[in-house]
Image (tube, rainbow, N blue to C red):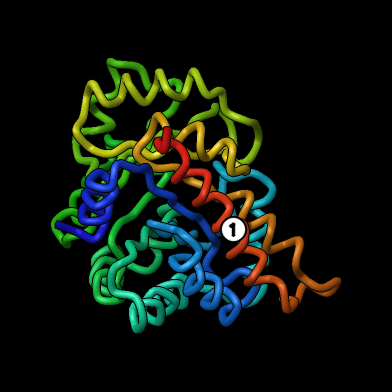
Amino acid sequence: MTRIDTTFASLKSQGRAGLVTFVMAGDPDHETSAAIIAALPGAGADVIELGMPFTDPMADGPAIQAAGLRALKAGATLRQTLELVRGFRNTNGTTPIVLMGYYNPIYVYGVEKFLVDAKDAGVDGLIVVDLPPEEDAELCLPALKAGLNFIRLATPTTDDKRLPAVLANTSGFVYYVSITGITGSAAPDTNKVAAAVARIKRHTQLPVAVGFGVRRAEQARDFGAAADAVVVGSALVDTVRAHLTADGAPGPETVPAVAALVTDLAAGVKAARSK
């Protein structure tokens, strides 16, 4: 079992949903990014998604695009992203880390070398949003062979005919994108999300995490009642941005502010099944 499998099994035994937190690697700089990542588990994150900065993030909204650009401006690279994971593993050997992003940086790095280095650094899974199931031989199957979970996205337009292909080589969990559009662009509909999660669960035994558009503890609570985990990203990177100085440098409240929001969101998720 991977750390992801172990974490979701633990959440199930506790009878609660989990909180998956997305932050951009290297935002706003390497040192602050490392401090943010280190603070997430203690604040209540069960799984960490770490964005791989990329110049052309087609599925991301303005907040995450800006976070990636801040990271790139500060000199972030895929190699440095792996170093962030390696540093995190020096003090935390249990919280799963999933790298999320696009195929181009991995392709340039070299797939075989990337998988070896990612596994060695302590990465547990990958979400690569621009590789469909038809391209599984490119990265998905080699990743699974290397012992990494490959997590696939399902969307409101993924119908029952398409869903088996999406799920075929998926492992760890299924990431349900709760809206059509880019990250952070709209608030998802609770009833529609619950119905979609139930439909996906008819096709798989994997946990289902819901993301895109979740920003507040109340939303986290509502979606945590239907899903196995709730994913929050744009709200966290917006918090990073809001606590930078005028010249873009981190301020004294940057890390504490992100941790405080995670604590609030985690309380919402934990309240989802308390009644």
Task: Tell me which residue sits at (40%, 65%) in the image.
Answer: 108
Q: Residue 228, percent across and down?
A: 34, 39
Residue named by callout 1:
55
Q: Is residue 160 left or right of residue 137?
A: right
Q: Residue furthest right?
A: 246
As displayed, is residue 29 above or below residue 199?
A: below
Q: Is residue 36 left or right of residue 256?
A: left
Q: Is residue 138 visible?
A: no
Q: Of residues 10 and 87, which is closer to you in this image?
A: 10
As displayed, is residue 262 above or below residue 181?
A: below
Q: Of residues 178 and 59, which is closer to you in this image?
A: 178
Q: Of residues 17 and 110, which is closer to you in this image?
A: 17
Task: Tell me which residue sits at (54%, 28%) in the image.
Answer: 179
Looking at the rendered structure, the kind of residue marked 1 is Thr
The quarter of the displayed image where residue 216 is located? top right
Q: Residue 209, percent across and down?
A: 38, 39
Q: Residue 30, percent across and down?
A: 56, 79
Instruction: Name the image quarter holding the C terminus.
Output: top left
Q: Residue furthest front?
A: 275
Q: Say what secondary structure mark 1 lies in.
A: loop
Q: How many marks?
A: 1
Task: Tell me which residue sits at (43%, 28%) in the image.
Answer: 155
As displayed, is residue 213 above or below residue 258?
A: above
Q: Is residue 241 visible?
A: yes
Category of crowding for the residue at label 1, using alpha-carbon neighbours closer than 10 angstroms: few (below 14), some (14–19), many (at least 20): few
As displayed, is residue 58 above or below residue 121?
A: above
Task: Tell me which residue sits at (51%, 71%) in the image.
Answer: 39
Q: Residue 17, percent across and down?
A: 37, 43
Instruction: Name the image quarter holding the N terminus.
Output: bottom left
